[in-house]
Amino acid sequence: MKTDEKITEIHSNHSIQRKNHTFTQNGITTLIPFRNEAHRIHSLLNSLKKIEVPVNWEIIFCDDHSHDLSIDIIQKFINNNPQLDAKIIQLSESEKGKKSALTAGINVAQFDIIHTTDADCALHPNIYWHLIRSIQQPNIDLVLGRVEFLIDLENKTGLTKENPENSRVVLGENKNRHLQQYQLIENSALIALGYTEFLKKNPAAANGANLVFRKSAFLSLGGYQGNNQFASGDDVFTLEKFILNNPESVAFCTHPHASVVSEVETTFNDFKNQRIRWMKKTFLQKTQKTALKQVFMGLFLLSFWVIAIEAVLSAHYETMALLWLGKLCVDAACVSLLLRNHPQKPCLLDIFVCSIFQILWLPTLGVLAANKQFQWKGRAHSA
């Protein structure tokens, strides 16, 4: 079945649901903060044209002092798609950072339901059918959505081949293949762990690339006050505030169509800075035990090297072989389960390389996150 036929079928199915379901909320606002995203915003823009929304919808692009062609590209998109209620807002000279961009967008948003995403993502055509239904459950004020790393944005988000230069393939390049595969495996594990924690009434992970909340509830909790000094964390700190106020107000939308596709990093330096930023914000959380769990994981992985070194020094090579074989078997089983329906499930060699990399990388990441500044969006940060 061709891509266009698949999308038509999906839209047809959901048209039936629209006739049988009444949405009480009058609209939804999509906030897209961006800074210098000219090189990778095309997938997002193409996906926005394909989205079917069951209520009124506005799109607000929030510019954080871009100095590339991002604004020109977005403005051209807006001009060429008058059917979309979209606009660009820009921060003043005294404002900077993602939270400031989001705050500016929230302040001018027309609707109480807010959806945040990132400029390097692409949205599923039917995403709002499920996110809106989730946020409209009784007493729900915050919904955590899925963020996935997928091989082909075209097949998963409904992009067309009319403009091949705008169709982005995430894992299609051979550049740093194993690094990309590692991110795919890691992200699938994070989704599974996040959902498991949610089922235990202890949601500990959120991603601002797919987050829905009520503007009224968000503002009543003080918005981003208290964590504006941190470069990121617009997602986990927001989750933390909602949990502290009322743990039952948070929901997790598991439907695969309620997903956002995000690009993987293709250079180690970008990957390193992204992971340092992620780890720093988890260590700053007040209510969750995420940081403690990460410390235990780091110590557990270090123990592999201690045992391996001891095995070599004492000439007990069979011990080292069994240790690594055991880890590889566990990793292979977990990856097979997590990515059983993924279009590019890693092969055994990929899993083996990623397994070794994990043992080296995660303890190192903990040290880097504790001591090192990092670069993000062309700015230096320490927290």
Image: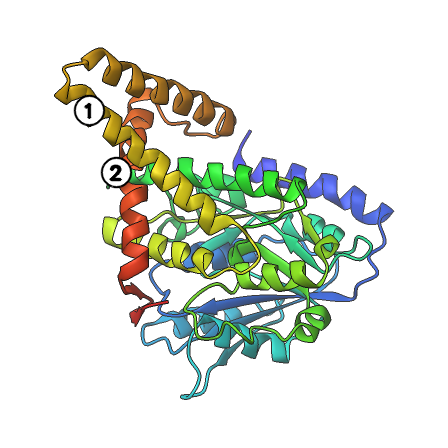
Up-down relation of residue 55 to residue 333 (above or below): below
Q: Give the residue type that dot 2 points to.
A: Leu
Identify which residue is drawn at 36% across, 75% down.
Answer: 66
Mark 1–mark 2 distance (CA, rounded to whole Å): 17 Å
Report the quarter where the N terminus lies: top right
Mark 2 Cα within 10 Å, few/some/many (few <14, many 20+)? some
Up-down relation of residue 358 to residue 83 (above or below): above
- Residue closest to the eye, 110 or 358: 358
- Residue closest to the eye, 192 or 110: 192
- Residue closest to the eye, 213 or 364: 364
Q: Give the residue type that dot 1 points to.
A: Glu
Q: Position of residue 219 (x, y in %)?
A: 67, 75
Report the quarter where the C terminus lies: bottom left
| Mark sitting on residue 360 | 2
Identify which residue is drawn at 74% across, 53% down.
Answer: 248
Q: Position of residue 113 (x, y in %)?
A: 70, 65
Up-down relation of residue 13 to residue 145 (above or below): above
- Residue closest to the eye, 133 or 85: 133
Secondary element under disc 1, as helix, strand or loop, is: helix
Secondary element under disc 2, as helix, strand or loop, is: helix
**168 on left or right of 338:** left
Residue beneath disc 1: 310
**76 on left or right of 131:** left
Q: Position of residue 303 (x, y in %)?
A: 30, 32
Q: Position of residue 62 (x, y in %)?
A: 50, 74
Mark 1 Cα within 10 Å, few/some/many (few <14, many 20+)? some
**Disc 1 or 2, which lies upstream in sequence?**
1
User: Do we see residue 316 in this rendering?
Assistant: yes
Quadrant location of residue 85?
bottom right
